[in-house]
Image (cartoon, grey):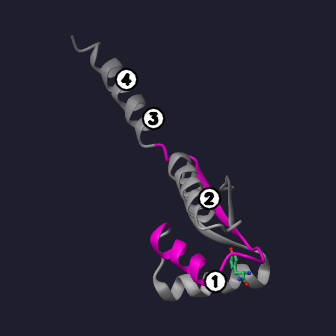
Amino acid sequence: MSTQQPEIIEVVKERSEVRTQEPPMYRVILHNDDYTTRDFVVEVLVYVFHKSPEAAVTLMWQVHRQGTGLAGIYPRDVAETKVSTVTSLAREHGFPLRTTMEPEP
Ligand code: TYC
C-alpha cells in the first residue's frame, strides 16, 4: 500500500506539467500597400484586432511609413483565423491588404 503512493504522485505531476505548457504563439503582421484606404485599415485593426481607435490610427501610420507592423500575437488557430478574416474582408471591399503570420521567437 505505502509503496504505491510515490508512483501515483509521479503520474499526476507529469500530467499537470503537460497541461500547463504554453501553446506556441504566432505574430500576425500587417503589410502596407498603395491601394487599401487608411480608414479601412483602421477599421480592421479596431474590429478584428480589438485595438482602440487611437492605437489603430498609430499602427496604421506605422505600417504606412515603415512597410509592416505587428497587429497581434496569438495561438496558431486564432492567428490563422485573423489572417483569413482580414483577407476575406479586404477582398470583399476590393482591397489588396495583406496579413501574414510567423512564429513568435
Ligand atoms: N498606404 C495606404 C494608403 O496610403 C494605407 C495603408 C496603411 C495600407 C497600412 C495598408 O497595412 C496598410 N492608402
Label 3 and label 2: CA atoms lie apart by 35 Å
- Stretch in magenta: 21-48
Q: Splitting the image into 4 quarters, where does residue 38 fall?
A: bottom right
Three-letter residue code for mark 2: Thr
Q: Marks 3 and 4, how far apart in space?
A: 11 Å
Mark 3 lies within 8 Å of ligand 1 (Cβ measured): no
Q: Residue at x 45, y 35 (%)?
A: 18
Q: CA distance from mark 4 to mark 2?
A: 45 Å
In the structure shown, which secondary structural element does the residue marked by tag 2 occupy? helix
User: Which of the 4 image quadrants contains residue 2?
Assistant: top left
- Identify the disc placed on residue 11: 4
Query: Rounded to the nearest whole Å, what is the CA distance between mark 2 and mark 1?
Result: 16 Å
Q: Residue at x 53, y 72 (%)?
A: 44
- Above-or-below relation of 2 to 96: above
Q: Amino acid at mark 4?
A: Val
Q: To which residue does mark 2 refer?
A: 87
Numbered disc 3: secondary structure: helix
Q: Nearer the N terminus, badge 3 or badge 2?
A: 3
Chain-order first, disc 4 or disc 2: 4
